C-alpha cells in the first residue's frame, strides 16, 4: 500500500512544489496538503486562523490517516506539525534561523515554539550548512538533522554560451523589500552614468513592482530594464540562459534554489555578502559577494567581473560542476525519500 504524507505549508511555493514532486517521483508517496487560507495581507485574521488551525489539522489527520506529517518553516507550520499528534514528523528550516525579523515583538514567542518543534520532530531538514549552524547553537540533537538541499532539475537548467559584449543581468527574486531590488537599480544607474551598456531583466512580482518601475524611470534606465512580472517556471531556464550575470541582494538567506538555478545555467553570481551566500560563493573566485545596500561596490564589482572574462568563464564551469555534485534534484530527492521510508519503517516497528 502506498504511504501517505500530509504536507503543511504553502503548496503554491516553488520550493514546496519541488519537495512534494520529488517525494512522489522518487519515494512513491501520496501527498495531501493543508495550508492557512488567509493571506498575509490580513495579519490579524491570519493569526486567528493559525490559533484554531490545530483542530483543523487533527481532523485532516483523522480523515486521511497519513503515515507522516512534513512541514516547512520551524516557527509556523513546523510548530503545527509538532502539535499535530502525528507519530512521525519531519520539519524544514527555510531561512538562516527562521527567527525573522529579529526586531519583531514576536521574536521570543517564535524562539519558544521553534525549540518545541525541534524537540518533537523526528527528522529536521537543514537545506544548507548555514541552517545547521543555527540548529547546533539552539541545542538541537544533530543526529536528527539532514544537511542536504532539495536540489534543482539539471535537465531543465542547462548551461549555455553567452558571448555578449555587454552586461546582460538577471534578477529572479520576489519583488519584496528584503531583496533590495532598489539597490540593484541604483547600481545600474551608476553604470548608465558611466556610459556602460547593459540590459537588466527583473523576473517576478511583489509589493514593490510599481515603486521599482518608477525608480527605473527616475534613474533614466527604464529602456534597459525589463520587468517580466510573474512567469511560469518553464520560462525561467531560457531567461537564465540568455543572461551572463545573476544578481541577488537579500538581507537574509537560507539556501537559495534561485542561486543554484543560475549557477547551473552558466550565469556568473553576484550576491549579497551574508552567511547563506558565503556557503556557496567565494568572492572573486566563483562569484562576488557584495555588502548589503552598497550600490557603489555593486556597480564597481559588476564592471570588474565584466572586465575579467577569463575568471568569469572559469567560475561558471566550476559552478556547474558544483551544482551537479551537490544540488542535483534527481540524487538529493532520492536520498530524502529513502530517509523518509527508513524513518517510517523504524517508527512503525
Image (cartoon, helix red, strand yellow):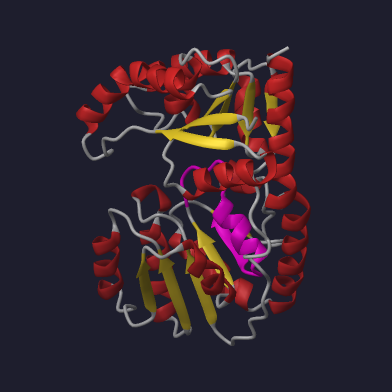
Horizontal and vertical percent for residue 283? 67, 57
Q: Where is residue 135 in the image (x, y as percent from the top left)?
A: 61, 24
Quarter of the image with the N terminus in it? top right
User: Does residue 198 appear left or right of residue 132 in this picture?
Assistant: left
Q: Is residue 263 above or below residue 282?
A: below
Q: Is residue 15 magenta?
A: no
What is the span of residues highlighted in magenta in the rendered image? 250-272
Left or right side of 112 for 155: right
Residue 138 x %, y %? 59, 18
Point out residue 324 in the picture as x, y percentages from the top left corner: 75, 57
Q: In this view, does 258 lie to the left or right of 232?
A: right
Q: Quadrant of the C terminus?
A: top right
Q: Identify the residue shown where x is 41% and y is 67%.
A: 202
Tell me the residue at 51%/66% (across/down).
234
- Residue 105: quarter of image: top left
The image shows residue 311, relative to residue 107, as above or below, that is below
Up-down relation of residue 233 to residue 347 (above or below): below
Which is more toward the observer, 133 or 294? 133
Q: Is residue 254 magenta?
A: yes
Instruction: For residue 72, say whether it is visible.
Output: no
- Residue at coordinates 61% horizontally, 72% vertically from top-left? 304
Amino acid at each position: 500500500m502506498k504511504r501517505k504524507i500530509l504536507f503543511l505549508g504553502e503548496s503554491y511555493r516553488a520550493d514546496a512544489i519541488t519537495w512534494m514532486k520529488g517525494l512522489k517521483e522518487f519515494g512513491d508517496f501520496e501527498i495531501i496538503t493543508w495550508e492557512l487560507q488567509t493571506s498575509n495581507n490580513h495579519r490579524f485574521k491570519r493569526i486567528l486562523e493559525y490559533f484554531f488551525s490545530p483542530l483543523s489539522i487533527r481532523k485532516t489527520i483523522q480523515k486521511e490517516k497519513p503515515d507522516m506529517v512534513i512541514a516547512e518553516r520551524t516557527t509556523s507550520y513546523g510548530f503545527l506539525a509538532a502539535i499535530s499528534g502525528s507519530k512521525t514528523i519531519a520539519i524544514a528550516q527555510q531561512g538562516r534561523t527562521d527567527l525573522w525579523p529579529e526586531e519583531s515583538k514576536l521574536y521570543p514567542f517564535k524562539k519558544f515554539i521553534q525549540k518545541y518543534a525541534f524537540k518533537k520532530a523526528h527528522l529536521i531538514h537543514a537545506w544548507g550548512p548555514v541552517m545547521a549552524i543555527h540548529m547546533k547553537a539552539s541545542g538541537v540533537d544533530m543526529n536528527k538533522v539532514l544537511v542536504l538541499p532539495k536540489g534543482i532539475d539539471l535537465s531543465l537548467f542547462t548551461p549555455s554560451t553567452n558571448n555578449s559584449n555587454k552586461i546582460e543581468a538577471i534578477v529572479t527574486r520576489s519583488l519584496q523589500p528584503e531583496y533590495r531590488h532598489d539597490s540593484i537599480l541604483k547600481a545600474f544607474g551608476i553604470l548608465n552614468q558611466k556610459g556602460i551598456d547593459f540590459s537588466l531583466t527583473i523576473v517576478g512580482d511583489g509589493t514593490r513592482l510599481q515603486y521599482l518601475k518608477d525608480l527605473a524611470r527616475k534613474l533614466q534606465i527604464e529602456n534597459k530594464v525589463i520587468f517580466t512580472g510573474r512567469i511560469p517556471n518553464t520560462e525561467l531556464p531560457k531567461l537564465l540562459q540568455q543572461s551572463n550575470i545573476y544578481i541577488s541582494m537579500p538581507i537574509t538567506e537560507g539556501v537559495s534554489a534561485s542561486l543554484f538555478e543560475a549557477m547551473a545555467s552558466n550565469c556568473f553570481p553576484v550576491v549579497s555578502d551574508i552567511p547563506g551566500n558565503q556557503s556557496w560563493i567565494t568572492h572573486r573566485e566563483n562569484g562576488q559577494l557584495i555588502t548589503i545596500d552598497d550600490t557603489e561596490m555593486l556597480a564597481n564589482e559588476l564592471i570588474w567581473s565584466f572586465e575579467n572574462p577569463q575568471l568569469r568563464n572559469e567560475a561558471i564551469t566550476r559552478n556547474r560542476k558544483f551544482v551537479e555534485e551537490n544540488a542535483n534534484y534527481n540524487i538529493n530527492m532520492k536520498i530524502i525519500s529513502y530517509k523518509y521510508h527508513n524513518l517510517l519503517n523504524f517508527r512503525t516497528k
